[in-house]
Image (cartoon, rainbow, N blue to C red):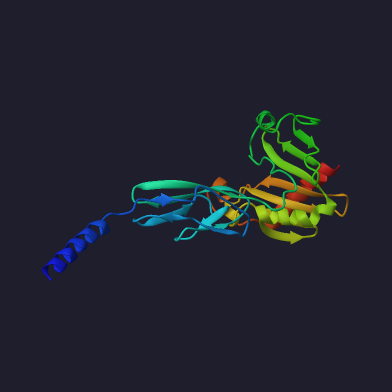
Amino acid sequence: MKKILFIALIASLCFSCGEGEQVELSLKTKEISLYPNERVQISAISGYNMVFRSANDYQATVSVNGLVSAGKVGETIIELASNDRVVEIPVEVKGRFNLYPDPILDWGITRSDLLEIAGESDNSPSNSVVEYLDYSDQAPRLVYLFDANDALMCTLVDVIATYSDDLFLYMNERYVFSSEDEGLSVFTNAYKDEDASSLIGVFEFGGEYVMVMYIENQNAETKSGHPVSLDIQNIRKRLKSLASVNRK
């Protein structure tokens, strides 16, 4: 009987020692690739609390349990913190509809800097215009327009009208729908109007092409320093004005 009690005591002591040892973070998920509306569970084990955080909720969100939900097309990072250790998990949200490569929307970039990034243009009739032809099979023409200060102010893409249905699927995978009226659909690149740095107008003229126009949201909170509601009427006027100038 004493022998049995002795063995039980030793086993209890060994179990207590093992129970006090915390398991360090073990991460199996090294990177994540998914499509909009898909979800992926991060595989990780730790004896300490694990805290998950997304660097950009526009591309992906993450639950307290590490379930990643895809947002809009793009890339972000999920941070996992446990004890004193922090690891980063790259996340790529891929598009199912890729009519054309995402254009450069670095508002204020100079013409020379843009050319260095995008390559020599196919046609530059003036210092305010940079044009690329054969941009993609579905969108043959890309145009960048610069203001008098040599700063990028507008980007235009002509999409073949027969791909208009796919174009709206393309837009919805990347941007947030804002409004629609008289052949113009407006999208933004943020869930909140005041956070949007770009406004995107899709014009259906009823002709051979659908025009996609990107302009800076000059009323963005990040630029003005105070929240301003988007005035869709003024946006519509500005987009249509630029569109009419480009079509002449």
Residue 204 seen by the camera = no
Side (left or right) of 115 relative to 87:
right
Point out the image quarter for the C terminus. top right
Side (left or right) of 51 relative to 55:
left
106 or 95, nearer to the observer: 95
Residue found at x 79% / y 48%: 211
Which residue extends farthest right? 207
x, y (%) of residue 34?
60, 53
Point out the image quarter for the N terminus. bottom left
Side (left or right) of 187 relative to 31:
right
239 or 51, nearer to the observer: 51
Residue found at x 78% / y 50%: 240
x, y (%) of residue 194?
58, 54
23 or 199, nearer to the observer: 23
Residue 130 seen by the camera = yes
x, y (%) of residue 98?
72, 49
Q: Which quadrant would residue 8 be assigned to in this image?
A: bottom left
Q: Which quadrant would residue 36 be assigned to in this image?
A: bottom right
x, y (%) of residue 228?
58, 54
Number of callouts:
0
121 or 111, nearer to the observer: 121
Q: Is residue 132 above or below residue 9?
A: above
Which residue extends farthest bottom? 1
Residue found at x 74% / y 60%: 180
Side (left or right) of 143 relative to 109:
right
